Amino acid sequence: MSLLPPSPPEVPPLSAANRLGSGGGSDNPTGPDVDPEAVYDRLGILLTLADADGESRYNADLPGVVDELVAQGIAVDSDGALCAFTDGVVGPDGDPVPLIVRKKDGGFGYAATDLATLRLRVDEYRATRILYVVDARQALHFRMVFDVARRAGWLPDDVAATHVPFGTVLGADGKPFKTRDGGTVRLDDLLDQAVERARAELAEKDHGLMPEEFEHVAQAAGIGAVKYADLSNTRTKDYVFDVDRMVALNGNTGVYLQYAHARVRSILRKAADAGIPLGRPVDPTLPLHPAERALALTLDELAATLDDVAGTLEPHRLAGYLFGLARAYTEFYDQCPVLRADDDGVRANRLALCELTGRTLATGLDLLGLAAPDRM
């Protein structure tokens, strides 16, 4: 059985902001009229404005990018524009699809900026793996940009550049999520809505939380619900934004996982209050209940799951694992008395399973960017 560190590691969370936020084409990565650092702080994202390079960062480099492409014969004149072409990339009419690096009017296309960006990341930042988390509709654009960059020598063979596409957030009508007047929905407004619904759900429970702690948990549950709803779906598929489903206490939701973690912590607190020692060595000679075995085997799958996520760049696999772990723990909790176990050795083994489950849930939620409250 794999053992985890006693607390979640300090790692950047996998953010839902790309699919849900408005951005692109601006020096402000979260869209116009939005304080990006305030949004990042609210989401728990470990970024500041110092980590962002807006398009203006590369303006001075664009003429040199184009000149070098022309000198290498990669960019050629096409009806007055300078374009690059990729073998095998043709349109419906069979004609080659151009990657416009400089327009007829002398302005630069997005391709020139993307090429300048990529060259900087390789030459100055020394990146060895570059991930472009961008709308799936830009797949052809990035295929051509990467091809041109490799031919130009700006993207060496030992540097991986990958387009990580994602689908679209839909409204209840099945169409791209918009405001009633057809505008872009602000991420801050979605978070406010989710926190409000989470607050209402929690208020119906006998939670025993003080007002300040209750508000902290409501914020964690609401914001976590939005993140989890985005990350638990297959990255390339569209999904419907349904805040009531997101904050549900049952089913594959972030709140359900947070509750599972809080339940584990509750058992461990009760054990401590009763003077039952924690951290006793596990006795592998004792027989296992089927629910104990199932939970132990599920816990042992974490490392393989994380390797899978890192290789496929699909965080929904981690979300699915955590949901399966929470269900396995519920089965264990229902069928295997912990504090009331008849045998001290059995009780110690079950408490060890509880401790490891709690740490695994906390670590997994942290990797997804969700808080793991001890009480809910």
Image: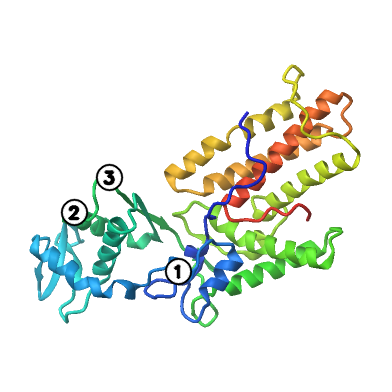
**Label 2 amino acid?**
Gly
Q: What is the spatial separation of the Cα atoms under label 1 and label 3, in whole angstroms?
A: 27 Å
Residue 141 in sight in this render: no
Determine which quarter of the picture holds residue 223: bottom right
Nearest to the observer: residue 126 or residue 274: 126
Which percent across, then down, holds residue 234?
A: 49, 51
**Label 3 amino acid?**
Asp
Q: Is residue 34 left or right of residue 279?
A: left
Comes first in the chain, label 2 or label 1: 1
Residue marked by disc 2: 153
Determine which quarter of the picture holds residue 42: bottom right
Quadrant, the N terminus: top right
Which percent across, then down, holds residue 159?
A: 29, 48
Q: Are marks 1 and 3 in contact (CB under 8 Å)?
A: no
Residue marked by disc 1: 50
Q: Are marks 2 and 1 in contact (CB under 8 Å)?
A: no
- Indicate the secondary structure of the residue bearing disc 1: helix
Nearest to the observer: residue 175 or residue 256: 256
Quadrant, the C terminus: bottom right
Residue marked by disc 3: 158
Q: What is the spatial separation of the Cα atoms under label 3 and label 2, in whole angstroms?
A: 12 Å
**Label 1 amino acid?**
Ala
